[in-house]
Amino acid sequence: MGIVPTLFQLPGEMTVQQQVVVVGGGASGMMAAGRAAECGAGVLLLEKTRRLGNKLRLTGKGRCNITNEAELSQFITHFGKTGPFLYGAFARFFVQDLVAFFEQRGVATVVERGGRVFPASNDARQVAAALEGYLVVNRVQIHCRCPVEHLLVEEGRVLGLQVGGRTVESAAVILATGGASYPRTGSSGDGYRLAAEVGHHIVPIRPALVPLLAEEQWVSGLQGLTLRNVQVTLHLNEARIGRESGEMLFTHFGVSGPIVLALSRRAVDALSKGRVYLSINLKPVLCSEELDRRLQRELDAHGRRQLRRILAELLPSKMIDVFVTLLGIPVDKPGHQITSVERKRIVELVQDLRVTIADSRPIAEAIVTAGGVDTADIDPRTMESRLIKGLFFCGEVIDVDADTGGYNLQAAFSTGYLAGESAARAVGGANCAYPRLKN
C-alpha cells in the first residue's frame, strides 16, 4: 500500500554533508523531512529502527485518528497550559490542511463521533504509506538503523551530528525523536538526552494517556467489564481536578478506557500531592432524587424480590456481587425489607463508586509521553531552538501533549510541517514560500 522508500546505508567515508538532517522517522519527522525537501532543501532522514512510522501504524488501534474537527480555540484547550505554544504551528498548518494533504495523496477521510477524523480505509498503514510517498517524491534520503549518538554544536550553532562513529555535517538539524512510550517502536527518549546535552531544559517526563492502578482489591474482580455512558470525576484529596463522561474499562490491575485515559495525566501529576481517587457515577443522567424515586418504585413493585434481582435493573450483572459487598446489605434481603437508610446508601454508591489510584502503568505502556523539551526553549513561530541556532524540534519530544481524539497527531504533523519549512529557509531553500494547502 503506497510507495515504500528505498532504505540506504550510510556511506563509508567519515564525513557526510547535508543541508537538513531530520532525526526520527515518525509522524512529525516524516512531515518535517518531506516539507523541508518540498521547500528546496537537500534532506537526510535518519531513523534508528528498520522502518519508518512504527508508532503511527499502531495509533487508534491501527485505525489512526489523524486529527479532530474541533475549532482552533477548543482544540488548543485539550493541551492544557502548554496549548498556546501551538498557535504558530496551527496557523501555518491545521486540520483542513492536513485533511487536504492526505486526500491529495489518496487517503480519503471520515469524521466520527466527537469530531475524530480517520482514514476512510480504517488502516493506519495507508497514512504511513502516504507520508513515505511524500518523502520519495521529494527525494528525501532515508537511512534506517541509524541511531544518532550526539549533536555537534559550536558557539551556539549546530554543525551536524554523530551517527555510527561518523560525522554528518549540517546547518540545520530537526529533532523528531518522539517520546519515551512504546519503546519497541523506537521512541525510547533519545531526543531528551540529545537536547539536554546541548543545554536544553527537559520538563520531567511521565506517562500520559495511560491506564491507572487501583488500590481496592475488588476492582480486579470486575476485570473485562466495560461501563458506557458513565461519568468519572478525578479528585485530589477532596478537591475535584477533572471530569469526563463516556466509556471506561475495569482491568486486572485497575481501570482504563477512553475517559480514564483522558484523566490519567492529571492523576499522575497529582499522585505526589495527596490521595487521588476516581468517583464513578453509574447513572449520571439522573439526579439523586430521581434515582431514589426510581429505586423506590422498584422496591414497591417487586418487594418480594431479593436485593440481587432488584439491583440487576440498575447495574451490570458482573458488578452486583461487588456492589452488595460494598453496601454491606445481605444479597438475599427482600426489597420490602430495605430501609430508607439502606436505600440512600444504594443511591449514594450508584452515584459515587470510588476507586483509589495507587499509580499508573509504566511509561512504556502510555500512549503519549508528557514532559520533554521545555517550550520556553523553542520559538513557536519557527520551532527553532532559542539556544542553538539551526536546531529545530517537532512532535512528542516537545513538552506538549493532549487528550485522546486526534489532537496529538495533529500537533505532530503541524510542528513537523513548520519545523521542516523553517529549517529549509534557514539553509536557503528555494521554495520556502510554497503556498499553504487549501481544500
Image (cartoon, rainbow, N blue to C red):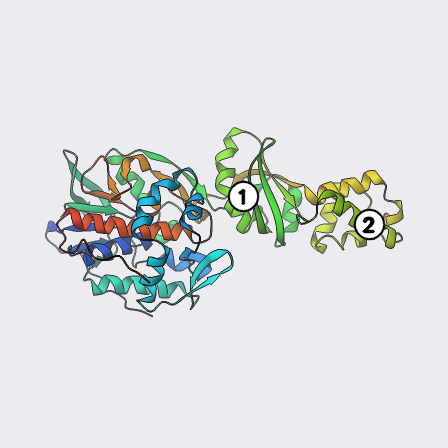
Q: Residue at x 74, y 52 (%)?
A: 314
Separation of marks 1 and 2 at Cα, in angstroms:
31 Å
Kindly give the residue lying farthest to the top in the view shown.
273
| Labels in figure, total | 2
Question: Along the line of sight, which residue is nearer the eye, 369 or 244?
Answer: 244
Q: Position of residue 281 (x, y in %)?
A: 66, 45
- 121 left or right of 195? right
Q: Amino acid at mark 2?
A: Leu
Q: Position of residue 143 (x, y in %)?
A: 22, 57
Residue bearing mark 2 = 307
Q: Position of residue 331 (x, y in %)?
A: 81, 48
Residue bearing mark 1 = 212
- 361 left or right of 345? left
Secondary element at image label 1: strand
Q: Of callouts 1 and 2, which one flags the residue occurring earlier in the amino acid sequence? A: 1
* Quadrant assignment for the C terminus: bottom left
- Where residue 234 sits, quadrant-wise, is top right
* Quadrant assignment for the N terminus: bottom left
Q: Residues within 10 Å of mark 2 (few under 14, many from 20)?
A: many
Q: Residue at x 47, y 46 (%)?
A: 209
Q: Residue at x 31, y 34 (%)?
A: 376
The relative height of residue 246 versus residue 384 in the rendered view (above or below) is below
